[in-house]
Image (spheres, helix red, strand yellow):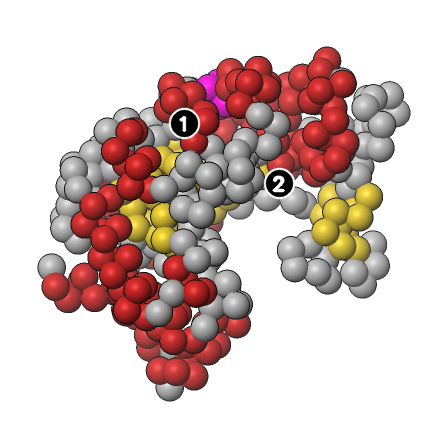
């Protein structure tokens, strides 16, 4: 089978050997791997099961100083910190009066089809994804500021809903831009959860986000594309809702967050949704021994991959705090299955 066929088999809940994987590294980690192996040839061991073939940038911005950028929503971001930091929200008050809301045209990527065609030509056997970046919740707090956003959903419900409607219209327009691109999936991204649970609570999530995302996922499915969403933190409380509205693949699956033990998720919902991720970026990768990393990767591959519905990956790109020997262990564990299959 091709890479694409193996990924599709897993998403359709049919077991494959090997189990498809993705693996990426922050630049600092890549540099240390180059030093460890003597050159960059270790990259040739990575199999291109999944390839991003372009996307639409929800963070278009221009520099206003050496350390500050302003995006199309008017929000100022400090870019000399990691992660970048919201300095001043674009909408200081919960009112549209005097506010110039950007249009879908402002975010359009005129080179999307060209980028996608080039990526697909380079990787004809890979499963291909178009990435749409920040979702409704992240875009909302990126406009209003995080504290304001948390307050708005309680004390300004009408405004909260109207701003989400406008953002939904933008998102639907971006999905529409993908209609003629023969990619396999559209990848959305929205961090609904933190370590303890859904940020605004499961009931408010259902009130504000469930039907809007259902409309977005339906638009993607109408193009014959699968739906994938990156989501950090704990979303265990809304897992049945996520499945009901048509999400095909949940990506990240942070095992350290409440209720996000991947093996328990697999047991409860593994026949209805595909999990992509699950190797702990806050636990196993930075703090485990190389042997513990190998053991956990093998367990994920065996138990999560049983019956399909799993794509192997770290919950996060390997971070700068990853010890070199652990980065080596992750690489070795991920790629050794290719030689065993």
Q: Residue at x 50, y 63 (%)?
A: 319
Instruction: Work out whether 221 lies above or below 133.
Output: above
Q: Quadrant of residue 314?
A: bottom left
Q: How many marks?
A: 2
Helix, strand or loop for the magenta stretch, by majority: helix
Quarter of the image with the C terminus is: bottom left
* Residue 214 among those drawn in magenta: yes
Secondary structure category for the residue under label 1: helix
- The location of residue 302, given as percent across then percent down, is 18, 50
Q: Where does label 1 land, which residue?
A: 239
Within 10 Å of disc 1 (Cα), the crowding (few <14, some 14-19, many 20+) is some
Q: Position of residue 68 (x, y in %)?
A: 79, 55
Which residue is rendered at x = 25% and y = 33% of the image?
Answer: 267
Q: Secondary structure at mark 2?
A: loop
| Furthest residue in direction left, as rendered | 341
What residue is drawn where x is 67% and y is 17%? Answer: 161
Q: Write down the residue under mark 2.
A: 58
**Is 55 rendered above or below residue 154?**
below
- List x then y, in percent, for residue 201: 57, 25
Report the magenta residues as a range: 213-217
- Does the rendering let one see residue 41? yes
Spot occupied by residue 240 in the image (x, y as percentages of width and height) = 38, 22
Does the CB distance between marks 2 and 1 fall below 8 Å? no
Q: Is residue 278 magenta?
A: no
The front one of 331 and 59 is 331
Left-right relation of 242 to 81: left
Residue 231 visible at all:
no
Comparing 222 with 315, the one in front is: 315
């Amino acid at each position: 089978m091709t890479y694409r066929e193996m990924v599709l088999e897993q998403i359709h809940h049919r077991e494959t050997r090997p189990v498809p994987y993705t693996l990426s590294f922050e630049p600092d980690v890549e540099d240390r791997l180059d030093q460890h192996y003597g050159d960059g040839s270790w990259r040739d061991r990575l199999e291109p099961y999944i390839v991003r073939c372009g996307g639409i940038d929800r963070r278009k911005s221009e520099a206003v100083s050496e350390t500050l950028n302003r995006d199309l929503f008017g929000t100022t971001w400090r870019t000399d910190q990691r992660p970048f930091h919201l300095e001043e929200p674009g909408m200081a008050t919960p009112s549209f009066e005097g506010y110039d809301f950007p249009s879908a045209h402002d975010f359009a990527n005129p080179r999307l089809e060209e980028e996608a065609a080039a990526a697909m030509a380079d990787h004809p056997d890979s499963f291909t994804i178009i990435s749409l970046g920040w979702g409704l919740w992240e875009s909302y707090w990126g406009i209003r500021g995080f504290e304001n956003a948390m307050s708005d959903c309680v004390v300004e419900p009408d405004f909260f809903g109207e701003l989400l409607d406008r953002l939904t219209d933008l998102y639907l327009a971006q999905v529409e831009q993908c209609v003629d691109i023969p990619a396999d999936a559209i990848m959305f991204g929205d961090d609904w959860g933190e370590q303890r649970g859904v940020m605004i609570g499961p009931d408010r999530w259902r009130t504000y986000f469930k039907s809007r995302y259902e409309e977005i996922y339906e638009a993607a499915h109408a193009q014959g594309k699968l739906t994938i969403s990156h989501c950090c933190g704990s979303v265990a409380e809304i897992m049945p809702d996520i499945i009901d509205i048509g999400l095909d693949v949940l990506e990240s699956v942070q095992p350290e967050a409440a209720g996000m033990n991947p093996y328990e998720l697999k047991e409860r919902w593994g026949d209805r949704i595909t999990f992509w991720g699950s190797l702990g970026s806050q636990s196993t990768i930075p703090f485990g021994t190389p042997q513990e990393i190998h053991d956990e990767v093998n367990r994920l591959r065996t138990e999560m991959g049983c019956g399909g519905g799993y794509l192997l990956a770290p919950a996060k790109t390997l971070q700068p705090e990853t010890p070199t020997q652990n980065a080596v262990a992750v690489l070795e564990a991920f790629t050794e299955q290719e030689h065993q299959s």
